Amino acid sequence: MTLLANPTLRLFIGAALISLSPIWVRLVDVAPSTSGFYRVLFGSAALAVYLIATRRQLHLSQRAWWLAIAAAIFLTFDLWFWHRSINYIGPGLATLLANFQVFIMMIAGIVFLKQMPSPVQLLAVPLALLGLALIIGFDWSALPEDYTLGVVFGLLTALMYAAYLLTLRAVRKTSAFRVLTREMAVISVFCAVMMAMTVLAEGESLAISTYEDLGWLVAYGVLSHCMGWLFIASSLSEVSTVEAGLALLLQPTLSFFWEVLFFDRAMTAIELVGAGIALAAIYLGSRPSSKQI
């Protein structure tokens, strides 16, 4: 329990749990938006069961309700833009652009929260993104002629991702509890409703064809969405925006290792160097000596 009192550790645990998200998505035979819907649906169900079992009531302030709804909207748009960015420019470049959230978080911290990054953090941010670029790789020559729209969607993903994180930070400040079970339950329910509308508007099916798919989707919702984001949300108001943005770059970095481990993905020397650079940069930007005064 003493270790979990450390907000940086909670942030890293949350990032590690959500890094499993691409693994769950790859294991199931449903459309990406459908898996996103079940992610938040099963996540909200797990939170609801916990709240009922512990007899905890919502009792949220009006401000907390509005912030939770706003967070759900930002998360829905984040997923919507990201999936379309992937369609235009592929998962590699789309993932890299989505993680430009770290720059948006840094700028928001400077402008709105008066959090000046340290020199080490200013170095760590572009270094971590360089490492991520080496991991995921992409070939500009292979991009279609209309790739510009995919880049725009990727950058909008980063904007929505950062907005979601900043809103979660504000939600955390309205709560008297370290673990935001009530707030995350509300966010997840609203997001599930909007994701269901998205799936139906896209003409996709909500059907789950096998019990195996059901099991993976439940794991996706409970482990990655419910537990992962509870760890992250509980730490956001206790760390700087730069540290939060850097720590979440751990997600795509670890996803690379999960692919190598679970799917026998071939690993090149460049990718291994990139992973090393990204992990070193995240460590440098998050250690106590690198934080703002």
Image (spheres, helix red, strand yellow):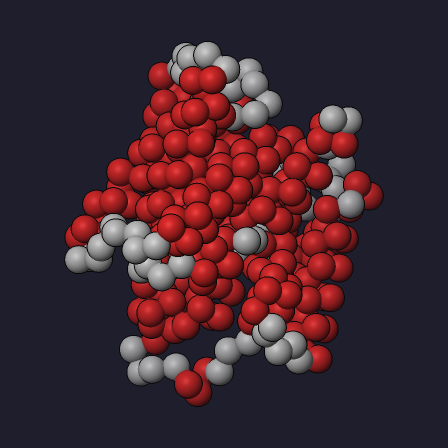
226 sits left or right of 259 in the view: left
Which of the two residues, 90 or 240, is positioned nearer the viewer here? Answer: 90
Outermost residue toward the front?
211
Residue at left offset 37%, top offset 28%? 186
**Residue 153 placed where, x, y %?**
35, 62
The image quadrant that residue 61 belongs to is top left
Q: Position of residue 175 (x, y in %)?
A: 51, 19
Residue drawn at (47%, 17%), measured in percent from left and top? Answer: 53
Q: Nearer the viewer, residue 19 or 245?
A: 19
Report the quarter where the N terminus lies. top right
On screen, residue 293 versus residue 103, left or right, reads: right
| Nearest the eye: 287 or 7 | 7
Residue at figure coordinates x 50%, y 78% from the top left = 138
x%, y% of residue 54?
50, 15
Please indicate, yes or no, whether residue 139 appears anywhere in the rendered image: yes
Task: Identify the residue shown where x is 42% and y is 53%.
Answer: 212
**Snapshot quadrant of residue 147:** bottom left
Q: In this picture, is 59 found above or below 272?
A: above
Q: Position of residue 47 (x, y in %)?
A: 45, 28
Q: State which quarter of the image contains the C terminus.
A: top right
Q: Nearer the viewer, residue 289 or 39?
A: 39
Q: Residue furthest right?
A: 289
